[in-house]
Amino acid sequence: VQQVRVAATEVYFDPKTKAGREGIGSTASKVSKSKIALISAMDNAAAKQKAILNKIQVAKKSVESQFKEIRNDVLKPRNDWQNEQDRIELERVTDIKNRIENLRKLGEFTEGDTAEQLASKIDILNGIDTSNGFQEFYWDANEEVKTQVSRLHSQIVIVAQAEQRKSE
């Protein structure tokens, strides 16, 4: 660029003459041609570098993918084991929650239940050892038993009163 600047400015052309104006035009044309040649060379170099960079990016993605696949293969046994443990734990918790739900159902009663039937359900509920088999849900199971026994006691009172009124 500096060489073109020096060459373009070392000769003075008088713009008042036709030859001077033509000399200025010719010099400006040479500057433009030099600019085009240099920019073209820079664009070509940039295109070659971009092609190399694109090849590197493709290779990088391939390497990343291969390492990810290797990592997943290495982790697979542990992940499979963890998934199995999660499944077993879910089954265990679901089983306990179902057993607690069965405690609730045991406390259900119908209009036709007698005081003796309700007392039998209370005996069954009181006979359940909630400290065994309910693990971290012990308190939930214990509360459910207490709630259902209380409901059944209240229903026994209602049934007993109804039976007493019938007998009178």
Image: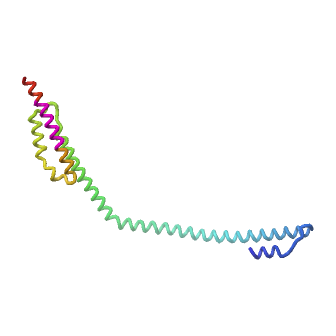
The rendered magenta stretch, by its main secondary structure, is classed as: helix
Task: Give residue 18's position: percent from left, percent from top.
Answer: 92, 67
Q: Which quadrant would the C terminus be assigned to in this image?
A: top left
Q: Nearer the viewer, residue 88 or 109?
A: 109
How are the colours assigned in the image?
A: rainbow
Q: Is residue 108 above or below residue 44?
A: above
Residue drawn at point x = 56 percent, y = 67 percent: 54
Task: Give residue 55's position: percent from left, percent from top.
Answer: 55, 69
- Horizontal side of 56 relative to 132 (left or right) equals right
Task: Give residue 53's position: percent from left, percent from top.
Answer: 57, 69
Q: Nearer the viewer, residue 120 or 155?
A: 155
Residue drawn at point x = 15 percent, y = 37 percent: 152
Task: Give residue 48's position: percent from left, percent from top.
Answer: 62, 71
Q: Quadrant of residue 162?
A: top left
Q: Quadrant of residue 85?
A: bottom left
Residue drawn at point x = 10 percent, y = 25 percent: 165
Q: Which residues are magenta?
A: 146-160
- Horizontal side of 6 relative to 155 (left or right) equals right
